[in-house]
Image: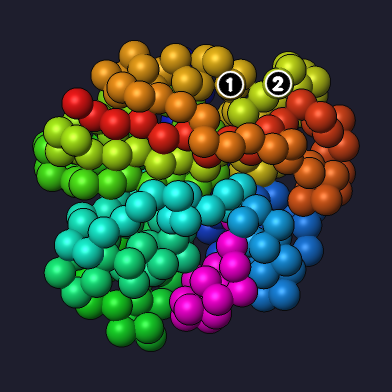
C-alpha cells in the first residue's frame, strides 16, 4: 500500500510540475485548454468573483479549484490560516487580504515548482503575511494547536491517505479552530479504466471517494459539527473533455467542521 501511495504522489507531483511549467488552467495533465482566460472562466464557474480574481497577482489563479472555500470561511483580522495544497497561491492571497497585517497565512504544497511560483507571486504582490512551505498534507510542517482556520480546495481528493490528512488537520488546529474544504466526491463508482488512469489522478477524479466515506473520515479524525455547506454536480465534460465516462458521478462539495 505504501508503494502504491508513493507512486500516486509521484504521478500527482509530476503532473502539477508539468502544469505549472505550461501554465495550464485545470487539473488535467494533458486534456484541457490553457491560458489565463480559461482559468478565470473555470474559477467563475466554481464560485470566485471577478473582484477576487483581479485582486491576486497574475499567475496565481491556475483554475485548479472546485469551489471557493475562502468565501465561506468567515476569516477574521488576525487569524492564522493554513492552506492545504496551496499551488500558486490563489486562495492564500485572498485569505491574506482578509486576515490583514495582524494575521498570517501558511501555504503547504508538495510540488517544488508550485512552491517556487507561489513565492514569486507573493513577492510580486507584496504579501508579507504569507509563507509557503514545502511539505505533504499527510505530514504537515506545522506545529500542534497553532492554526485558526484550515482551507483546502480540490486537493484532499488527490491524497491516497485521506484519513491521515484529516488527522493532521485536527492536530494543527487550535481548539475552536475551523476546517473549510472544497473538494470532489463520488455519487457512484467510476469506471475501472478511469479509476486506474494516471491522468484522472492528476485530474482530481481517480482519488475521489464516496461522500459518506469522506464525511466519516473527518468525524473519525475528531472533528465535530461536520456539515455539507453546499453541493453541486461537477461538470466533468466541460472541465476535462475526454472524461465523459465520469459525468454524473462527481459532485463538488463544501464541507465545514470544528475542533472542540
Horizontally, residue 55 falls left or right of residue 204, namely: left
Apparent side of residue 175 relative to residue 107 in the rendered image (left or right) = left
- Give the residues in magenta: 48-64
Where 129 sits versus 257, above or below?
Answer: below
Looking at the image, residue 227 lies above or below residue 85: above
Residue 61 versus residue 178: which sits nearer the camera? 178
- In the rendered image, which quarter contains the C terminus? top left
**Residue 56 highlighted magenta (yes or no):** yes
Which residue is located at x 29 percent, y 78 percent?
A: 127
Secondary structure under tag 2 reads loop
Residue at horizontal 52 percent and vertical 36 percent from the top = 229
Where does the image place residue 207, in percent across and percent down from the top left? 59, 29
The disc, 2 or 1, on the residue closer to the chain's N-terminal end is 2
Q: Which residue is mark 1?
A: 211
- Cα separation, mark 2 vs mark 1, equals 7 Å
Q: Which residue is mark 2?
A: 187
The colouring scheme, among rainbow, by chain, secondary structure or one colour, is: rainbow
Q: Quadrant of residue 77?
A: bottom left
Label 1: how many Cα within 10 Å (few below 14, some 14–19, many 20+): some
Asked if the residue at tag 1 contacts the one at tag 2, i.e. Cβ–Cβ closer than 8 Å, the answer is: yes
Q: Secondary structure at mark 1?
A: helix
In the rendered view, would you say 30 is above or below 57? above
Image-based side of 26 in relation to 137, left or right: right
Magenta run includes residue 38: no
Amino acid at each position: 500500500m505504501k508503494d502504491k501511495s508513493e507512486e500516486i504522489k509521484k504521478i500527482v507531483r509530476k503532473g502539477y510540475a508539468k502544469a505549472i511549467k505550461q501554465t495550464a488552467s485545470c487539473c488535467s495533465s494533458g486534456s484541457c485548454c490553457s491560458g489565463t482566460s480559461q482559468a478565470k472562466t473555470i474559477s467563475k464557474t466554481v464560485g470566485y468573483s471577478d473582484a477576487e480574481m483581479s485582486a491576486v497577482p497574475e499567475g496565481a489563479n491556475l483554475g485548479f479549484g472546485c469551489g471557493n472555500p475562502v468565501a465561506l470561511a468567515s476569516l477574521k483580522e488576525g487569524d492564522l490560516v493554513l492552506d492545504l495544497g496551496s499551488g500558486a497561491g490563489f486562495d492564500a492571497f485572498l485569505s491574506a487580504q482578509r486576515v490583514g497585517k495582524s494575521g498570517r497565512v501558511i501555504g503547504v504544497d508538495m510540488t517544488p515548482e508550485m512552491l517556487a511560483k507561489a513565492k514569486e507571486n507573493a513577492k510580486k504582490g507584496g504579501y508579507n503575511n504569507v509563507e509557503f512551505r514545502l511539505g505533504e498534507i499527510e505530514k504537515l510542517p506545522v506545529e500542534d494547536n497553532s492554526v485558526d482556520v484550515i482551507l483546502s480546495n480540490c486537493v484532499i481528493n488527490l491524497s491516497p491517505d485521506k484519513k491521515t490528512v484529516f488527522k493532521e488537520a485536527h492536530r494543527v488546529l487550535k481548539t475552536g479552530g475551523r476546517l473549510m474544504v472544497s473538494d470532489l466526491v463520488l455519487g457512484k463508482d467510476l469506471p475501472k479504466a478511469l479509476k486506474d488512469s494516471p491522468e484522472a489522478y492528476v485530474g482530481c477524479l481517480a482519488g475521489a471517494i464516496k461522500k459518506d466515506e469522506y464525511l466519516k473520515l473527518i468525524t473519525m479524525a475528531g472533528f465535530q459539527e461536520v456539515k455539507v455547506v453546499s453541493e453541486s454536480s461537477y461538470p466533468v465534460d466541460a472541465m476535462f473533455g475526454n472524461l465523459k465516462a465520469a459525468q454524473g458521478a462527481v459532485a463538488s462539495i463544501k464541507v465545514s467542521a470544528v475542533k472542540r
